[in-house]
Image (cartoon, rainbow, N blue to C red):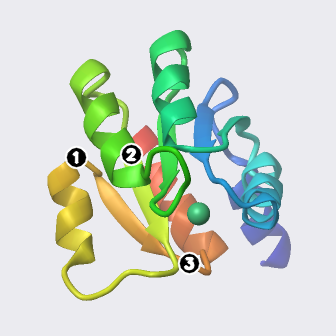
Amino acid sequence: MEEKTEDMTRQALPEARILVAEDEDSNYRYVEKLLKKAGFDLLRANNGFEAVEYAKIYEDIDLILMDIKMPVMNGVEATREIKLIKPSIPIIATTAFAIPGDREVFLKAGCDDYIPKPIKPAILIDLIRNYLKF
Ligand SMILES: [Mg+2]
């Protein structure tokens, strides 16, 4: 049974690439470990501006995990910009600092979903699975 759970986290699409927009190294490393274990190819943006630039440059981004609190450009603004140019890329917002009503703000900005920090691995993998249909 334990082995089956392990296998499930490894059943990523081999070509799936996730852009992780996260300004804090420790948060990125946590997500990196989790998503690499699940077999994803990752790109990191250090702020919202970089996330928008990567979304423009890379044609093969399948999903974006978007931190909300970031320098230069926050995740809400970055999401609005990315959805204008690449509306089909699913964006999952994440933050440790949500207040009541924030989820609606994120969704209105164009985020497809929201996951609070600390990110629970199984919930994130399930969400990604759902958007990538695997
Ligand atoms: Mg942050």
Within-10-Å neighbours for mark 2: few <14, some 14–19, many 20+: many
Please report whichever mark, 2 or 3, sits nearer to the chain's N-terminal start: 2
Residue at the disc numbered 2: 91
Residue 133 seen by the camera: no
Within-10-Å neighbours for mark 1: few <14, some 14–19, many 20+: many
What residue is shown at x 49% (from left), y 30% (from top)?
62
Instruction: Give, as a three-letter code, the residue at label 3.
Output: Lys
Please report whichever mark, 2 or 1, sits nearer to the chain's N-terminal start: 2
Q: Could you say where residue 61 lies in the image, as x and y percent from the top left?
A: 53, 25
Residue 103 falls in image quadrant: bottom left
Q: Could you say where residue 32 lies in the image, as x and y percent from the top left?
A: 78, 52
Instruction: Give, as a three-letter code, the residue at label 1.
Output: Gly
Label 2–label 1 contact, CB within 8 A: yes
Secondary element type, mark 2? strand
Residue at the disc numbered 1: 110
Which labelled disc corresponds to residue 117?
A: 3
Label 2–label 3 contact, CB within 8 A: no
Secondary element type, mark 3? loop
Would residue 91 appear left or right of 125 to someone viewing this image?
Answer: left
Within-10-Å neighbours for mark 3: few <14, some 14–19, many 20+: few
What residue is shown at x 45% (from left), y 29% (from top)?
52
| Image: 65 above or below 127 | above
Which labelled disc corresponds to residue 67?
A: none
Q: Could you say where residue 9 lies in the image, as x and y percent from the top left?
A: 71, 58
Label 3–label 1 contact, CB within 8 A: no
Please report whichever mark, 3 or 1, sits nearer to the chain's N-terminal start: 1
Which residue, as the protein is rendered here, is positioned at the far bottom? 100
